[in-house]
Image (cartoon, rainbow, N blue to C red):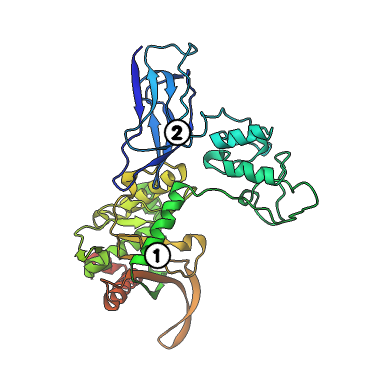
Amino acid sequence: MAIVEVKVPQLSESVAEATMLNWKKKAGEAVAADEILIEIETDKVVLEVPAPAAGVLAEIVQGDGATVVADQLIAKIDTEAVAGAAAAPAAAPAQAAAAPAPAAAPAATGGNKGDVAMPAAAKLLADNNLPVGAVAGSGKDGRVTKGDVLAAVAGGVKSTAAVIPTGVPAKSLPQVASPAGSQDLGERPEQRVPMSRLRARIAERLLQSQSTNAILTTFNEVNMAPVMALRKKFQDDFTKEHGVKLGFMSFFVKAAVHALKKYPVLNASVDGTDIIYHGYFDIGIAVGSPRGLVVPILRNADQMSFADIEKKIAEFGKKAADGKLGIEDMTGGTFSISNGGTFGSMMSTPIINPPQSAILGVHATKDRAVVENGQVVVRPMNYFAMSYDHRIIDGREAVLGLVAMKDALEDPSRLLFDL
């Protein structure tokens, strides 16, 4: 027997532990080299753990739901064994309630291919004589969680038929039937689910930001007509030349870097009683994903062309949607941009992403009545909001920095001449 150990990959310095999601193989099954065995969720990303060698998965040391740390042993592969032969039973880890549950049959709603029950959920299902397919999973890739089962049992679930209030998207509420007996919740279903590591980390960081930073927000309005005209004029040629569309985010990034160069304190951070001025411009771009808000970093954004920025943002968007963003994609950052306008937001006060000291919020561009030279005219206007840490950034720098962004967008030629 030649055993190869499978261990938790290295985590970032700021991540102490991670959670095992679900094993894609069972003990005794054959695995190929580099085949993904399991996904591990940290408070930043989901990491895939590949098989270090081909063979048979001889033993699962840490089961679904276990809490693990970097370099911890989670499984063993026998490189000389043959699939189907007797294999060591899966160990029941201290952190996990049971061994990995088998894949569930597709639910009546169509069933996700990843629809399986987490260990604690599988035990509850068995205790209540319920098939996995009778409960809709709210976890990653449709996994059934303990909370799903508890909510279903409390609601007297008998099948996958959902009772959903009129006008409410089915995916937004638990798929549970009305409770048995005289009690009737009517159109008021509820579901309790634990926060994912990412969501819990987001909550922690936002509270930290509000409790440690002296956050103030300054606003300004931007006439987007010049940018829109420029974009319309060169869109076709830009797409043909670079293979990507010319969006607004590249203009926002360029304008932000332009202002940060003029007012370096906007690009600085606080470390104890010291102010760290960064000689580089790593811009975080807030991106929505199925797991929550993530902020991948455009490194050395000042050295990137419009095409470079657009390609990188498109790459980040796809990675976020697929859950493939790595720790290296989101580590660092000296300034962030959040584009609530994508979802139709008119105004917001963004929260600083620690340890940064400022963040720009851009919103939906709408035709509005404005006054120019004493005349009321219609212009496509966007309201910008920049939140900043008043401990190191005075109102003067914040306001002038935002004005510099406004000027660059209302006259993009300023970006060419660094004015």
Q: Can you name the residue that lies furthest to the bottom here?
A: 374
Q: Nearer the viewer, residue 367 or 42?
A: 42
Question: Splitting the image into 4 quarters, where does residue 232 fall?
Answer: bottom left
Which numbered disc covers residue 351? 1
Residue 121 appears in the rendering: yes
- Label 1 CA crowd tier, 10 Å (few <14, some 14–19, many 20+): many
Which numbered disc covers residue 270? none
Q: Is residue 295 above or below residue 366?
A: above
Work out how far the residue at label 2 is from the one at label 1, CA to CA, in angstroms.
39 Å
- Circle nearer the N terminus (2, 1): 2
Q: Is residue 301 above or below residue 98?
A: below
Amino acid carrying mark 1 in the image:
Ile
Q: Can you name the residue that lies furthest to the front here?
A: 94
User: In the image, which is nearer the foreground, mark 2 or mark 1?
Assistant: 2
Amino acid carrying mark 2 in the image:
Ala
Q: Position of residue 249 (x, y in %)?
A: 38, 59
Q: Nearer the viewer, residue 106 or 98?
A: 98
Residue at 43 percent across and 28 percent down: it is 37
Question: Splitting the image into 4 quarters, where does residue 399 fall?
Answer: bottom left
- Quarter that holds the N terminus: top left
Residue bearing mark 2: 94
